[in-house]
Image: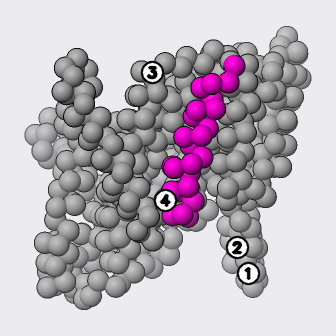
Amino acid sequence: MVFSSVIFLFYFLPALVILYRIVPEKLKNLVMIIGSFVFYAWGEIRFLPIMLLLSVVDYVCGRLMEKYRADDKKRRIFMLIAVLANLSVLIFFKYTNFFVGNVAALAGWDHIKVNIILPIGVSFNTFQSISYAIDVYRGTTSCEKSYYHYLTYTTLFPQIIAGPIVRYVTVEDDLDDHLLTLDSLSAGMRRFTVGLAKKVLIANNVGFIWSKISAGQAGEPSVLLYWIGIIAYTFQIYFDFSGYSDMAIGLARIFGLTFDENFNYPYISRSITEFWRRWHITLSGWFRDYVYIPLGGNRVSKPRHILNLLIVWALTGFWHGASWNFIFWGLYFALILIAEKYLYGNLLEKLPAVIQHVYSLLLVIVGWVIFYFEDLGSMGAYLRGMFGLDGSPLWNSQSLYYLLGYGLIFLAAAYFSTPHFKKIIERTETSEKKPVWIGTTAVYTAVFASCVAYLVNSTYNPFLYFRF
C-alpha cells in the first residue's frame, strides 16, 4: 500500500496531469476515464466490470426517464430500476454477512461467514449514482445524453475511494467545459498537499497511539490512558477523512472540476446539531435531500418528526458499516439531536461558549467509542474505563509517558482542527508580494517532500474510510 502510494504520487499522477492538460478538449474526459480505471484497478481490478455495468444501467435509465418525462409511471419505474440496481450491489457486498449472521443467530443456526470482499468506496459510488437517478426523475437535472460524459462522472478517481459524495449537477458543466488555468492548477496542488499532510503527518501519528492503546499494548490501563487513546482516535478519524476529502477536492481543481466542501472544522461546534452541519457535509446533505425530506422532514407532527430523525440516523449509521455498533452510533446522535430540538436546545444556547464546546466534544468523543468498537463488550469496557468504573487508577506511569511523549502532536492536532491556520494560509496566498509567494511555495514543497519521505519509511498508513 505504501509503495503503491509513492508510485502514484511520483509517477502516475504527474503523468496524468500533464497528459490531461496537453490533449485537445474533446479527449480530456477520455484521459480522465483511463486515469480512473488505472487508479481503481490498482487494487480492485476484479470489480471494474460491476462498475461498468452499473454505469450502463444508470445511463440507460436516465435516458429513458428523459424520454418518458410526461409519463410519471414509466419514469418512476426506470428510476426504481436504477436505484435498486445500485442498492443491490451495495447490499450484497456490504451487508450480506450482517443479515445472514443475524438471521442465523435468531434461528439458532451455526453461522458460516461468506467470504465477500468489499469493493473500495462502494458506499460513495452507489450513493452518487442513486442521487443522479433521483435527480433526473425529479427533473432537477437533465439526463446526460453522452455515455462518455456519464462514465467520466461515475468513475471520477479523485473521490471514488472515499468521497466527498459528488452529485452530477455539481460537475455537469465542468465535464463539458474544462476550465484549466494556472490558478486552478496551483490551488489544486496546494489543497492536495494540505490534505496529504493532514493524513500522513497528523492522522497516521495519532492513529499509531490509538492502535497501541485500543489493542491493550500500552501497558496497564488508567482513566487518563483511556482518554488519551480515544482523543487520539478523535483526531485520527477527522484528519484521515478530511485529509482525503482535501486531496480529492485538490485533485478535482487540478483537473478543472469543482467538488463541494465536505468538512468545516466540526470540532469547534457548540452543539451536536452544529457538528453535523460541519462533519461529512455531503453525506448529511444526501440523507437530507433523498431520505429526510421525502419522509416529510420537520413539516410533520412532533411524533412523526422524531420518527423521521430516528430513521435517517439509523440509516446514516448503517451506511458506515454492517454492524450493530454503527446503527447504535447513528441512533445515539439521533437521540441527542431530538433532545437539542425539543428539550434543552434553547438552554444550551444561553450557556457560555466554553461549556457548549465541552458539551459537544464530550458527546462526540463518546460517539467515537461507539463507532469504533464493533464488539459491544469491548465498547462497554472502554466506556467504563473512561469514567473510572472498571477500577482503573486515574493515571499511572504509562499514561504519563504517552501524555508527555506525544503531547506536541496532540497540540498540533488541536490547533489544526480550528480555522486559525486556514486564515494564515489565505492571507499568504492572496499576498502579491514576491517574497511571500516564494516562501509559501517553499513551505508547500517542504511539506509535500516530508509526506513522501514519511510514506517511504512508514508501514502504518491506513485510510479509515476506504472500508466504507
The circle on residue 98 is: none
C-beta proximity under 8 Å, tags 3 and 4? no
- Which label's residue is closer to the chain start, 1 or 2? 2
Three-letter amino acid code at disc 4? Leu
Q: Residues within 10 Å of mark 4 (few under 14, many from 20)?
A: some
329 inside magenta stretch:
no
Q: Which residues are magenta?
A: 1-24
Depth check, mark 3 against mark 4: the one in front is 3
Three-letter amino acid code at disc 2? Gly
> What secondary structure is found at the residue carrying circle 4?
helix
Q: Residues within 10 Å of mark 3 (few under 14, many from 20)?
A: few
Depth check, mark 2 against mark 3: the one in front is 3
C-beta proximity under 8 Å, tags 4 and 1? no
Left or right: residue 186 versus residue 62 is left
Q: Residues within 10 Å of mark 2 (few under 14, many from 20)?
A: some
Give me the C-alpha separation between circle 2 and circle 3: 54 Å
C-beta proximity under 8 Å, tags 2 and 3? no
Q: Is residue 110 above or below residue 116?
A: below
Examine the rendering and report whether any part of residue 157 can be seen: yes
Residue 17, image quadrant = top right
Three-letter amino acid code at disc 3? Leu
Residue 213 picture location, percent across and down: 32, 77
C-beta proximity under 8 Å, tags 1 and 2? yes
Q: Is residue 405 above or below residue 155?
A: below
C-beta proximity under 8 Å, tags 2 and 4? no
| Residue drawn at 16 percent across, 79 percent down | 401
> What secondary structure is found at the residue carrying circle 2?
helix
Residue picked out by circle 4 = 464
| Residue drawn at 21 percent across, 22 percent down | 434
Residue picked out by circle 2 = 101
| Residue drawn at 25 percent across, 20 percent down | 430
